[in-house]
Amino acid sequence: QVRLVESGGGLVQPGGSLRLSCVASGSIFSESAVGWYRQAPGPGKQRELVAAINSGGSRYADSVKGRFTISRDNAKNTMYLQMNNLKPEDTAVYYCSLATIGYDYWGQGTQVTVSS
């Protein structure tokens, strides 16, 4: 059983920065692909990939390239999302995810609001 717990969300002004953290329980973290997703408010909005790390490296949504950085610390079973130069359109609930063969685990989500 894997449990993911996010932290670090909040209210920030446009141009500001936040760092999200996600701590995983269990012993499979270091061998798993991990990622951050977000779901913006409003009808019809779907959860979308923000950034991910797997054995092939890191990848980012075009909308966050150059502003967000995903990283992981396997010794701490923790993944991070450093978000710089935040924009109002980054407002969303952010979820961390850990992918194993046959099953994906999700955190409960953390709210990020970018507003002046």
Image (tube, rainbow, N blue to C red):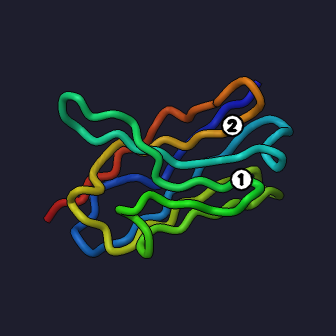
SS of the residue at dot 1?
strand
SS of the residue at dot 2?
strand
Q: Is 37 situated above or below 43?
A: below
Tell me the quarter of the picture where residue 85 sits.
Answer: bottom left
Rounded to the nearest angstrom, the CA distance separating label 2 from label 1 is: 9 Å
Q: Is 47 situated above or below 77?
A: above
Q: Which residue is mark 2?
A: 99
10 Å crowding of disc 2: few (<14), some (14-19), many (20+): some
Residue 42 position, x and y percent, is 19, 34
Q: Which mark is residue 26?
A: none
Which residue is at 23% across, 56% downward? 89
Chain-order first, disc 2 or disc 1? 1
Q: Is 105 situated above or below 98?
A: above
Which residue is at 81% across, 35% downward? 26
- Of residues 84 and 101, the one nearer the viewer is 101
**Amino acid type at image mark 2:** Ala
Q: Is residue 10 left or right of residue 95?
A: left
Q: Which residue is mark 1?
A: 54
**Amino acid type at image mark 1:** Asn
| Mark 2 in CB contact with mark 1 (< 8 angstroms) | yes
Q: Is 39 situated above or below 80?
A: above
- Of residues 67 and 12, the one nearer the viewer is 67
Which residue is at 77% across, 44% downward? 32
Q: Is residue 44 left or right of residue 94?
A: left
